[in-house]
Amino acid sequence: MMRLGRRASLLVALFLLTCAATACAECAWVLWSGSGGASLPVGAWDTKSRCEEAKNERQRTVGSAVERTTVTFVCLPDTVDPRGPKVR
């Protein structure tokens, strides 16, 4: 009887891990641009690798056009907002 309980627990844990991995795989990735303490969303992609490709392209484009200004780009899941919580 004890083995059955362990197997059931293991199956439930495996199911929950699978659901969590699937949910993360389905999330969108947002490219954020930051300069002078302000962050703005630039665009969104369905995978992190596509977001990273867009980030690299933006860095090449902006890097050659901007002088004396620091502009950063970062890809984050769509559930993360680098601007912090909204004040209500």
Image (cartoon, rainbow, N blue to C red):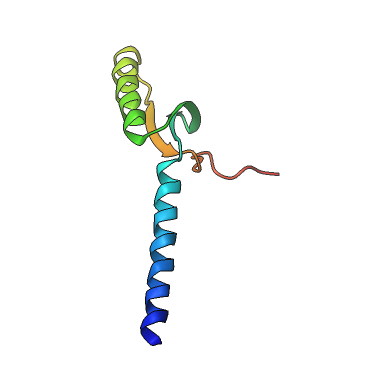
Residue found at the very far bottom of the displayed protein? 1
Residue found at the very far right of the displayed protein? 88
Mark count: 0
Q: Is residue 8 placed above or below 84 in the rendered structure? A: below
Image coordinates for residue 48, horizontal then vertical, percent:
35, 35
Q: Is residue 29 placed above or below 68 in the rendered structure? A: below
Residue depicted at 45% across the width and 47% down the height:
23
Q: Is residue 54 placed above or below 78 in the rendered structure? A: above
Q: Is residue 82 left or right of residue 67?
A: right
Q: Is residue 38 left or right of residue 51?
A: right
Q: Quadrant of the C terminus?
A: top right
Residue depicted at 34% across the width and 26% down the height:
55
Image coordinates for residue 75, horizontal then vertical, percent:
39, 35
5, 45: nearer the viewer: 5
16, 31: nearer the viewer: 16
27, 62: nearer the viewer: 27
- The answer to which image quadrant residue 65 occupies is top left
Q: Is residue 50 left or right of residue 36?
A: left
63, 30: nearer the viewer: 30
Image coordinates for residue 25, horizontal then vertical, percent:
40, 43
Q: Is residue 35 placed above or below 63 in the rendered structure? A: below
Image coordinates for residue 15, horizontal then vertical, percent:
42, 61
Q: Quadrant of the N terminus?
A: bottom left
